[in-house]
């Protein structure tokens, strides 16, 4: 049953990626919405689940929250090591000329970003979707009611996963082909995860720890990369409304699914 339900997550993920591709002329709105969806998923879905599953205090702080901060710092360190913005190497001074040249040549504007960061972030999204599938399968092992609740949350927010996977990959200057490959991998991941639960059972605390760590990394990407990029050239009210709307959408999803 879990594998069958995961097919819905597969289709919803592809639909999210397709939506991201179709609105290239409104890129700032896409990024604004993506940032809101990511913020909503982290704050209203991932983090509460992580604390509930791995809330054992370590020196007075729940384990999931420590890993949440660790995930945020890990993403920051990776970005710095890969010199995403490369400010210390004069990218800021040369950016305008490089952008103009790439536009004339039909190339992609990367704004000094390293494409490997986008692929790494997308790979993390795939890993998250894999865990979605595992959570789905584990929920159906508990019972049909629990499985149905988790299925609603997974299938609905997989739209955001597909949307964000394609957006993150392409944002860092990767070719459309690579973005599509990562999107397909993200769509297949829940099916693989759900099928794997036929072979083993994932400890609840381990799942919560993973969700906390991943949530921190995802929040960093939203706050430090996606949202600033959305408002860089188009600081419009419509962009802000898309961000707020993304958070509101996830709120509704969490509320409908019973938290």
Image (spheres, rainbow, N blue to C red):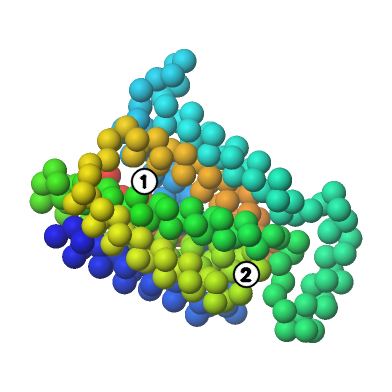
Q: Is residue 217 left or right of residue 55?
A: right
Q: Which mark is residue 146?
A: none
Which of the two discs, 2 and 1, sits closer to the camera? 2
Which quadrant of the structure image shows residue 4?
bottom left
How far apart in space, not on screen, are marks 2 and 1 (Cα)? 29 Å
Q: Which of 200/183 is in front?
A: 200
Name the spot of residue 191 as percent of width and height, x first.
28, 62
Q: Is residue 188 left or right of residue 108?
A: left
Q: Which of 248/226 is in front?
A: 226
Identity of the residue drawn at 56% across and 52% down? 222
56 up-or-down from 220: above or below = above
Q: The residue tagged with tag 1: helix, strand or loop?
A: helix
209 up-or-down from 27: above or below = above
Which quadrant of the structure image shows residue 58?
top left
**Total numbered badges shown on the rendered structure:** 2
Name the spot of residue 214 as percent of width and height, x first.
46, 44
Q: Which mark is residue 174?
A: 2
Identity of the residue drawn at 70% across and 51% down? 82
Q: Is residue 241 visible?
A: no
37 up-or-down from 26: above or below = above
Count residues near mark 1 (Cα–Cα under 10 Å), then give few for <14, some for 14-19, many for 20+: many
Identity of the residue drawn at 47% across and 39% down? 213
Q: Which of 235/140 is in front?
A: 140
Q: The residue tagged with tag 2: helix, strand or loop?
A: loop
Name the spot of residue 120 as percent of width and height, x first.
56, 56
Identity of the residue drawn at 19% across and 51% down? 198
Q: Which residue is mark 1?
A: 45
């Amino acid at each position: 049953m879990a594998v069958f339900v995961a097919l819905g997550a597969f289709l919803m993920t592809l639909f999210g990626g397709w939506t991201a591709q179709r609105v290239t002329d409104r890129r700032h709105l896409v990024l604004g919405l993506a940032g809101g969806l990511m913020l909503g998923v982290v704050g209203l879905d991932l983090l509460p689940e992580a604390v509930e599953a791995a809330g054992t205090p370590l020196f007075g702080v729940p384990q999931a929250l420590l890993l949440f901060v660790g995930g945020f710092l890990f993403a920051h360190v990776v970005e710095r090591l890969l010199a995403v913005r490369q400010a210390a190497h004069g990218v800021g001074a040369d950016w305008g000329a490089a952008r103009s040249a790439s536009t004339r040549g039909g190339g992609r504007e990367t704004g000094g970003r390293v494409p490997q960061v986008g692929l790494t972030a997308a790979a993390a999204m795939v890993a998250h979707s894999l865990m979605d599938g595992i959570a789905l399968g584990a929920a159906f092992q508990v019972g049909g009611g629990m499985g149905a609740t988790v299925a609603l949350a997974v299938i609905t927010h997989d739209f955001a996963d597909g949307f964000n996977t394609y957006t993150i990959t392409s944002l860092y200057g990767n070719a459309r082909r690579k973005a599509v490959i990562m999107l397909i991998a993200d769509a297949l991941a829940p099916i693989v995860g759900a099928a794997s639960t036929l072979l083993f059972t994932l400890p609840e605390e381990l799942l919560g720890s993973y969700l906390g760590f991943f949530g921190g990394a995802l929040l960093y990407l939203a706050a430090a990369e996606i949202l600033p990029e959305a408002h860089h050239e188009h600081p419009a009210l419509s962009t802000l409304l898309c961000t707020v709307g993304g958070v509101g959408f996830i709120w509704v999803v969490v509320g409908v699914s019973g938290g």
